[in-house]
Image (spheres, coloured by chain):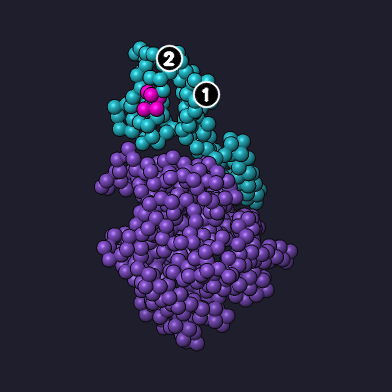
Chain colours: A purple, B cyan
Amino acid sequence: MSTTTHDHVVGHDAGHAIPTGWRRWVFATNHKDIGTMYLLFSFVMFLSGGVMALAIRAELFEPGMQLMRPEFFNQLTTMHGLEMIFGAIMPAFVGFANWMVPLEIGASDMAFARMNNFSFWLLPVAAIMLTATFFMPGGAPAGGWTMYAPLSTQMGPGMDMTIFAIHLMGASSIMGGINIVVTILNMRAPGMTMMKMPMFCWTWLVTAFLLIAVMPVLAGAVTMLLFDRHFGTSFFNAAGGGDPVLYQHVFWFFGHPEVYIMILPGFGVVSQVIPAFARKPLFGYASMVYATASIAILSFMVWAHHMFATGMPVTGQLFFMYSTMLIAIPTGVKVFNWVATMWRGSLSFETPMLFAIGFIFVFTVGGFTGLILSLAPLDIQMHGTYYVVAHFHYVLVAGSLFSLFAGWYFWAPKWTGKMYNETRGKIHFWVSMVAFNVTFFPMHFLGLAGMPRRYADYPAQFTGFNQVATIGAFFFGLAQVYFLFAVALPCYARSKELLDAPDKPWDGAEGLEWTVPSPAPFHTFENPPEVV
Amino acid sequence: MAGAGEHDAAAVWMLKRNCAITPKQFGVFYCSLATVSLSIAAFWTALGAWTVLPFAGIDLIAVGSAFLVYARHATDYERIIISPGHLIIETAQASHITVIELNPRWIRIGLEDKPRPKIEIRSAGQVVLVGTHVPVHQRAVIAGEMRRCVARLG
């Protein structure tokens, strides 16, 4: 971890007029403002996707159709996935990157401030287009977030809007990735060598590399869908000489690295939170960096484990099975290092630490079920069941989302200048943690018993676990509303009831971001600090 | 980044932006990215999914342009040397170096009359602006240092 010899307090905001009113946000070029807009956008999408999830769970509370038509149920499952992945998780991590990367490397802003503005404003446009598909003839896309052909080639015009929205979101991600790469590589403060960088920056550098490498694959896949739909090609139409399985291969070649795009920055957040509250340096920093890079490299070699049930030669099954199992090694290194960092540390359990430990616990459960699914013979049994739904929600909700919450509680004092209410933070954590497990743990049993995913109805034998899951989901949703109104908004509204945050609210925290005042001034590190 | 030093009765200000990577390292990073991205695109093109290739091309052009725009100015600097009888301003911008020599006895140093002003060095109708790479709040300080140096040495 780095230390600095620079006096950072002097000179912030000197000689600058800070823009005000709507222009500050619409024409924003400041990394902190853009970061805040990303976080706000992602939370809106999180709520939108969350409402869809609750509608799905409400319908599944009892067997039979109660609240909606099956077609609409399918639209909800599809849009829930798309909005949560492309609208909530990815932009939330980009928001964190915008806020924290310049502050952590001692840079004054992102490398391309105007491109940063553009890449953000593409997102609301894409989100509106995506959500507007509900009101189009035929409704929203209903073939699942993976948009498999031939379902997607047969759907209404909503699919075209979705394809366009995905192109826009992909362009936004690539621009965001370029900005982060150039910022991290070029704008590190003197003395901030690569191996002194905070883990969050490292994980984002690797993530940005992944984004830039795989987004063209997604763009190519959805463009082929568009061509098949409107331009007479037969990429995925067997009758025209095409192959629908090709779409699955191309999609998952993007889709699996995408999983790591959504979790690696979370690893970075947790790797900074745990040392701060264990009051010890991160155990095995170098191995963490190499494990991150290893996960990224392996992520290109495992895509077809999503397709064991589609069919492939035994050699292919073996290759993808073993390569998938290999990912457990660098991931295990990370989990080991987090636990070793806590070992004999002077631990305290403020909300960021609770979410970080919660992350380790539930993410590890998700990792183990992933290992089970990597076994081709087992996966063929479990493919398309609720076991898979449980697995990826353990990884993405409890993994990505809990790490995002850990990061928010950790850095919100720096962003808002206010200490959140610790009691309310803990209530948020415990209700989220319990409700999450009540929601998703029974899904393992449902999946093992054979309940298929993406079905609006089910046999009566599955009623009990579904009812438990639905009750848990509503409590989980309420916990997030509680977070918004009782924890986050009072901080952003600078409530007088909350304590002012000191420059460094966590005594074990290290890094350049804690050397600037709280809230971080509009301009920081205009003169790069010296890191020793 | 700004730095001033005095030796042999001359004062030197080296004003440059912070850059943590050499153009060569940047090139290596870009080549690794291009290799991965083009290999992926070529793989899918060979399997019939040729639409990946143009997007990979657009992607790499965008990344390359961004790298180029940044790297082109990464080594820009302004060096101001004030010695008895000479004021030399050496400016490097996108590998183009210009050197201007002025007589310190006939110069006036101040700040532009604009928002976010640069340092203005005037001499016999000629105006040279420096301080692009210095934070705004430091420009007045550096202009003051230069004025004092000129008064002492000039």
Q: Secondary structure at mark 1?
A: strand
Compared with residue A426, is residue B19 higher up or lower down, i.e. above or below? above
Please rate how many residues cluster around mark 1, counting C-alpha atoms within 10 Å: few if below 14, some from 14 to 19, many from 20: few
Q: CA distance from mark 1 to mark 2?
A: 19 Å
Within the image, what quadrant is residue A408 found in? Answer: bottom left
Q: Position of residue A69 (x, y in %)?
A: 38, 73
The residue drawn where x is 46% and y is 86% is A464
Quadrant of the image containing the N terminus of chain A = bottom right
Amino acid carrying label 1: it is His
Residue at 62% across, 76% down: A381
State how many labels appear. 2
Looking at the picture, do discs 1 and 2 lie on one chain?
Answer: yes
Point out the stretch of residues depicted in magenta: B144-148
In this rendering, would A262 be left or right of A420? right
Mark whose residue sits in front, 1 or 2: 1
- Residue A454: mark: none
A471 sits left or right of A336 in the view: left
Residue annotated with mark 2: B102
Q: Residue at x 35, y 47 (%)?
A: A522
Q: Is residue B15 magenta?
A: no
Front residue (pair A409, A260) = A409
**Is residue A132 in view?**
no
Q: Is residue A528 above or below residue B125?
A: below
Residue type (three-letter) at the residue carrying disc 2? Leu
Report the front residue among A361 and A337.
A337
Q: Main secondary structure of the magenta part?
A: helix
Please give left or right for residue A321 compared with residue A359 in the image.
right
Observer-nearest of A195 and A167 = A195
Mark linked to residue B7: 1
Residue A471 appears in which quarter of the rendering? bottom left
Between A79 and B119, the one lying in front of the other is B119
Residue B131: x %, y % from top left: 41, 29
